[in-house]
Amino acid sequence: MKPHDANPPAQSSPSLSQEEEMTRLSKTLAEKDADLARLRQDKAHLKAIIEHSPDIIMRFDQNFRHLFISRAIEKVYPMAAAEYIGKTHGELGFSHEECQFCEHILQKAFFSGEPMEGEIPFRGIYGQRIFNWRLIPEYGSSGKVDTVLCLARDITAQRTAEKSYAALFATMPYGFALHEIIRNEQGEAVDYRFLTVNPAFERLTGLPQKRITGKRVLEILPDTEPEWIERYGRVLAGDSPMHFESFSAAMAKHYEVTAYALSSETFVTLFHDISERKKLLAQLSHSQKMQAVGRLAGGVAHDFNNKLNIISGYAEFAQGLLEPSHPAHQDLDEILKASRSATELTRQLLTFARKEEDACPAIIQVNAVIQNMLNMLQRLIGENVRLVWRPGENLRPLCMDPSHLDQVLVNLCINARDAVGQEGRIIIETRNSHISPAESCEIPDLSSGEYVQISITDDGCGMSREVMEQVFEPFFTTKKKGEGTGLGLATVYGIIHRYKGVIRVYSETDVGTVFSIFLPAHQGKYHEPDREIPDPATRIGRETLILVEDDPALLALNQAMLERLGYTVLPATLPGDALRMAEASAGTLTMLITDVIMPEMNGPTLARTMTEHFPGLHVLFVSGYTKNMLCQQGLVTEDIHFLQKPFSFQELARKVREILDREGNSTHACF
């Protein structure tokens, strides 16, 4: 019996080993195929990136020949990318200077083995361009630089934008400043620092960049108001950009400012000076106020003057019936004085509103007018105040009503007297003044040309800035209650502007005040005025007059005045009544005296209707409105006969007689 091996050695299955090996090999091949696919995909991606990149990508060998160049070069230079391969810049026809530059930087990159970067101008098919280039040395297996990769990017638009920004920064009319906020330990904004400013900033503030860059605002302008710093702190705290107007006491200017944050600690301000705009707006506001008061004055003048006419007329009547020694005679004098004072107040109101009483402009010598006023002015200001008169030589003549110049001088000297107080000095000066076009730009409302300048200077208490800004406002006064109407300087303002002049005021508290008046000089020569012929004495009349007045009390007064002078008066309160009376008295009617503003129809319409039926009828218009105002509204013309209410008994008598005695006078010429 053979011995039996219970555990023979194990043997691998040939078929199983081959299967495993095949599986392993298949897996390896699959992985390699996947790697190749990824490589192909990466290569395709890289090629797509290179082909579509706006940057020009190049590779050079040690002989500076092109090993590769992307197709982006074709957008700059008219040559296919394939034509560059294997050639140097010189062989491709580049300029000598371009070849030298390229070879120089490539040689430096091969020698140093360090990346390099720079900019180069290049003239391609689209003209001069600017390229940013970067050289990257590539090391071979020997450890030396075999090739150099070059990346070139067109930065022309960027550099152009930078130049445009720099030009804008340098020439923009707005001030620009970059600031850094300064905070205290609690994180509150307490100051800010100047980082950079533009030339407009220097021009608008007067602060040079070299002096302020890197410094704090409170170091440069210690009087800067805290509100400026607080505003900028709010902008940095997350508020939206801020737009505001503010007055800088440190600069003595008004600014319009826009501020916005760049980061949590830096912000930018854009601003411009609006001081002149503020000044013009204030002047516009002043003008509008004066126009509003003028409209108010025109509205009340008619009725107010009617009442004054009644008061003064009956007082004059009553006084004429009494002997001067009668106790009531003096009382009636006071009534007449008060009436004249009220009349003057109304006329002042109309004067500064440019609806003043009819003026009588004449060619005058300013020095002569002022010389004749000196004694009266000295009495007005008192003996304790010294009046100094400094007339200019060869003064040009003016064309204005001398009474208006008197009114200007009186108002300004009274104001100066009140400012001086118990004792001091008031100086009146005149001189010729030439205003150039450049100077006229600095003085609003003043055109270039020849002017006569009148200055009234006092060494009194002076005025603050706030008072100076309101000094010509109607009804504005610094005097105690009951001591001033606030119309004096407003009247002066109205007179000066009526003659296309300008008045300016400069004052310092506790130093004094100067009022400077510029009036356009008359271009012609001055001739001595003819002497006035005295009015003839009032004589008794016998004519028949028709009187039309819608105020019954004033109608009765004027009727009594005219009847006392001997006239036959037909009174009417309405134009219709006047027409009926005229028809009934056609053969005897000589003159129509009519108010201008009336119900039913106005005075001019009534006059036209009556003169059509009665040729040769004389017409006298009366009104509480001024003649100028009525002309501006187109109600009457300049050549009419006109009497301003309130008028005295003597004025009415003289005017009526003057019209009736003028031969050949007819109302046909008035319409």
Image (cartoon, grey):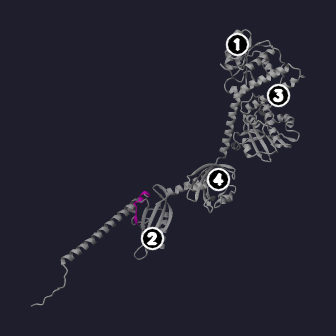
Q: Are marks 4 and 1 in contact (CB under 8 Å)?
A: no
Q: Quadrant of residue 482?
A: top right
Which of marks 3 and 4 precedes in the sequence?
4
Q: CA distance from mark 1 to mark 2?
A: 116 Å
Nearer mark to the viewer, of 4 and 1: 4
Label 3: which secondary element = helix
Q: Is residue 145 left or right of residue 436?
A: left
x, y (%) of residue 272? Answer: 63, 49
- Per the rendering, the mark at residue 137 is 2
Could you tell me the amino acid type at mark 3? Lys
Residue numbers of the magenta segment: 67-76
Q: CA distance from mark 1 to mark 3?
A: 42 Å
Q: Which mark is residue 227?
A: 4
Query: Which residue reaches farthest left?
Result: 1
Q: Residue 336 shows which numbered tag?
A: none
- First in sequence, mark 4 or 2: give its number: 2
Q: Which residue is mark 3?
A: 337
Q: Is residue 639 above or below residue 113?
A: above
Residue situated in front as seen by the camera: 274 or 398: 274
Q: Amino acid at mark 1?
A: Pro
The disc at residue 615 is 1
Q: Nearer the viewer, residue 480 or 202?
A: 480
Q: Quadrant of residue 602?
A: top right
446 and 468: which one is in front? Answer: 468
**Crowding near the residue tagged with mark 1, few <14, some 14–19, many ≥20 C-alpha atoms within 10 Å:** few
Q: Looking at the picture, which amino acid does disc 4 mark?
A: Glu
